Image: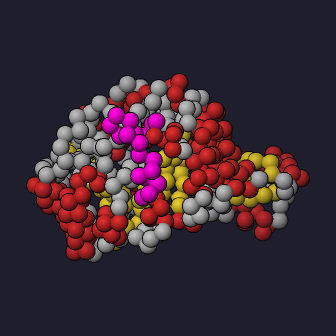
């Protein structure tokens, strides 16, 4: 039987100087065709006779490319089935976001942990119980072959001693279970000195993330300590130390961007470029969503996209690597099967943005490690029904968006069943990044 084809629903289309660029959001494949070829393929799809050579057809319709797909395929349903299968049947990484404390020496205006009871740091007894719990969990899940250990907070380096004990304990457990192990840390960067870097580098240290909000005056006005104590210079000292030593290969610098600071971000990027360490720095831009700050402050999606793209243009001109796409899903640690946020009192959550909020606890290391790390609020797969009904081409980039943001937007657990839709942002950012990369 003769197979007929159509353009994939997940293709993004952009006019570039050599013709038409098509990128498939699911496979990531990019092809450029001249306008005539594009038209002739479109015409022949309509006529049912595909007039492109066999070789070109193979290139476009290969499952790894999927620019053209079989005309009877339902890409949306296939996408969701594959996502759920991958999540449930192919999970092999155990991820702990480990919080030695949720205290922090910074007083950022927009902190998502503002207003929560930050309690005290983790006690040795909780760490010891956590190790027992993790061992039991690993024994119950022989499919796990890798262990990702992420130090998170608050500021994890406020509990340096406990942090060191946890690194020793969990690394040893991974060795004993013959798992591939690595460490990451998300820190405000103030206390990450050579002694801390040395300690981390003994534990397969793969990633460090610090945050900057703009050049010194902007950053210090937003990410300051008690009584407005400035922090920019301290963080830059850490960045300089990390890019001039060998404790870790690269430093991830996350730049928070909203309508207030967006126009000043290019200045920060130029200042970072002066370090001359573009090959040692990964830049990312964190767009603050309306659920993390007031809507007025965050601004309209298209305004934010323009500011972020202007910043990426400067980053590219300065020699930094820029991303080719902008994602708001479909995966995150809160959805992953063997992933958990382990809080200082031993309670467990799925999403690292909910730390300290009791209503998001779903278990504790003091309970037996039964089943898998399940909080049903993060398993509402049907939430993409509306995305599918609307045939949204951004589904592979988004998957219905952040579940926590949906819960905040819709005022509670009911939100977990709904989308958090940022389609305008996804549209502008993805076409803009494609143009910057290939234009
Ligand atoms: S639910 Fe949202 S905030 Fe939480 S980890 Fe996932 S993407 Fe991040
Ligand atoms: S939430 Fe919005 S942008 Fe995301 S896949 Fe659904 S319809 Fe598309």
Can residue 111 be seen here?
no
Q: Quadrant of residue 261?
A: top right
Does residue 428 appear left or right of residue 372 in this picture?
right
- Give the residue drawn at x 26%, y 43%: 103
Question: Left or right: where does residue 178 sit relative to residue 110?
Answer: left
Q: Where is residue 235? Give x, y as percent.
A: 43, 52
Identify which residue is drawn at 31% across, 66% down: 195
Q: Quadrant of the N terminus?
A: bottom right
Coloring scheme of the render? secondary structure
Mark yes or no: residue 233 visible.
yes
- Residue lying at the far right in this picture: please name it: 36
**Which residue appears at 34% of the width and 45% of the height?**
352
Q: Nearer the viewer, residue 117 or 109?
A: 109
Stretch in magenta: 221-238
In the image shown, does 284 or 147 lie closer to the viewer? 284
Q: Is residue 161 a member of the stretch shown in magenta?
A: no
236 within the magenta span = yes
Main SS, magenta region, reads helix
Q: Residue at x 78, y 65 (%)?
A: 56
Picture coordinates of residue 439 (x, y %)? 77, 53
Dividing the picture into quarters, in which one does residue 70 lie? bottom right
Q: Is residue 335 above or below residue 185?
A: above
Residue 384: x %, y % from top left? 49, 38
Whether 169 is drawn above or below 83: the answer is below
142 lies left or right of 23 = left
Most distant residue in the left direction? 125
The answer to whether 316 appears left or right of 397 in the picture is right
């Amino acid at each position: 039987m003769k197979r007929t084809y159509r353009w994939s629903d997940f293709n993004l289309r952009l006019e570039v100087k050599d013709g038409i660029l098509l990128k498939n959001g699911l496979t990531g494949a990019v092809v450029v065709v001249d306008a005539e070829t594009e038209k002739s393929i479109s015409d022949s799809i309509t006529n049912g006779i595909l007039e492109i050579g066999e070789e070109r057809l193979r290139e476009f319709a290969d499952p790894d490319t999927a620019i053209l797909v079989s005309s009877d395929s339902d890409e949306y349903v296939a996408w969701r089935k594959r996502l759920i299968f991958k999540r449930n049947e192919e999970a092999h990484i155990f991820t702990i976001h480990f919080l030695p404390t949720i205290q922090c020496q910074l007083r950022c205006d927009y902190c998502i942990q503002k207003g929560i009871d930050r309690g005290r740091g983790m006690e040795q007894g909780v760490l010891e119980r956590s190790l027992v719990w993790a061992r039991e969990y690993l024994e119950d899940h022989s499919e796990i072959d890798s262990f990702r250990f992420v130090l998170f907070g608050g500021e994890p380096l406020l509990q340096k001693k406990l942090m060191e004990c946890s690194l020793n304990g969990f690394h040893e457990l991974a060795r004993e279970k013959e798992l591939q192990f690595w460490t990451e840390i998300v820190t405000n960067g103030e206390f990450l000195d050579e002694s801390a870097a040395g300690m981390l580098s003994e534990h397969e240290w793969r990633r460090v993330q610090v945050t900057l909000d703009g050049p010194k005056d902007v950053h210090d006005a937003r990410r300051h300590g008690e009584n407005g104590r400035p922090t920019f210079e301290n963080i830059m000292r850490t960045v300089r130390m990390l890019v001039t030593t060998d404790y870790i290969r690269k430093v991830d610098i996350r730049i928070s961007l909203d309508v207030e600071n967006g126009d000043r971000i290019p200045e920060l990027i130029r200042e970072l470029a002066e370090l001359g360490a573009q090959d040692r720095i990964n830049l990312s831009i964190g767009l603050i969503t309306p659920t993390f700050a007031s809507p007025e402050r965050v601004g309209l999606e298209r305004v934010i996209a323009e500011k972020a793209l202007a910043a990426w243009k400067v980053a590219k001109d300065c020699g930094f690597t820029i991303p080719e796409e902008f994602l708001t899903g479909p995966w995150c640690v809160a959805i992953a099967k063997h992933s958990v946020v382990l809080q200082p009192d031993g309670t467990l959550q799925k999403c690292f943005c909910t730390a300290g909020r009791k209503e998001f606890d779903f278990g504790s290391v003091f309970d037996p490690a039964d089943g898998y790390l399940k909080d049903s609020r993060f398993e509402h797969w049907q939430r993409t029904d509306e995305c599918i009904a609307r045939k949204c081409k951004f589904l592979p980039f988004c998957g219905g968006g952040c579940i926590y943001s949906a819960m905040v937007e819709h005022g509670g657990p009911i939100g977990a069943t709904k989308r958090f839709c940022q389609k305008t942002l996804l549209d502008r950012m993805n076409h803009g990044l494609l143009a910057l990369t290939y234009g």
